Amino acid sequence: MALKKSSAQMVADARARIEEIETADLIAMVDDPNVQIVDLRDPRERERTGFIPGSFHCPRGMLEFWVDPDSPYFKDIFAEDRKFVFHCASGWRSAISVDTLNDMGFKAAHLKNGFSEWVKMGGPVESKD
């Protein structure tokens, strides 16, 4: 079965429209109180590989509902006046997610190459929530 658009094309299209943050730049912002890092990975990924200190965990499947103030699932953290930077493992899910959020009117950016590059570059990692 041929798809109208591949997942790779969706990621490429999203990346052309959103703000991407390089790993070294986000490592430098990790303690900035005006920046909120949001982890979109599955809970098992987070448990297995650790997470960025201070990051907020928002499973990808709940993102649009947690961000929407009219949703019964809204999370107050998303009403804060901060720069939101989303990430996943490699930057694919977060690129599509941030593109969707921008379409909703929620301004956000994403970690270009994800948590895997964060770890390779020596970014801080915690292992217990």
Image (cartoon, helix red, strand yellow):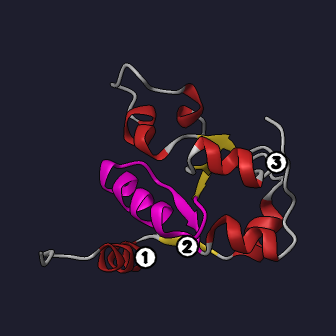
> Amino acid type of disc 1?
Arg
Instruction: Report the residue at 55% width, 50% height from top.
Output: 40
Position in image of residue 127 (x %, y %) = 84, 45
Left or right: 101 with respect to 111?
Answer: left
Left or right: 14 with respect to 29?
Answer: left
| Rendered view: 13 above or below 69 | below
Q: Which mark is residue 20?
A: 2
Magenta residues span 88-112
Q: Which mark is residue 95?
A: none
* Distance (Cα) linking label 2 and label 3: 20 Å
Asked whether 25 falls inside the magenta stretch, the response is: no
Instruction: Report the residue at 39% width, 52% height from top.
Output: 101
Left or right: 10 with respect to 78?
Answer: left
Are the two marked residues, 2 and 3, in contact with CB atoms closer than 8 angstroms? Answer: no
> Amino acid type of disc 3?
Pro
Position in image of residue 91 (x %, y %) = 54, 69
Which quadrant of the figure contains the C terminus?
top right
* Distance (Cα) linking label 2 and label 1: 7 Å
Q: Please identify the residue farthest to the front as the structure is shown.
A: 1
Q: Which residue is mark 1?
A: 15
> Amino acid type of disc 2?
Glu
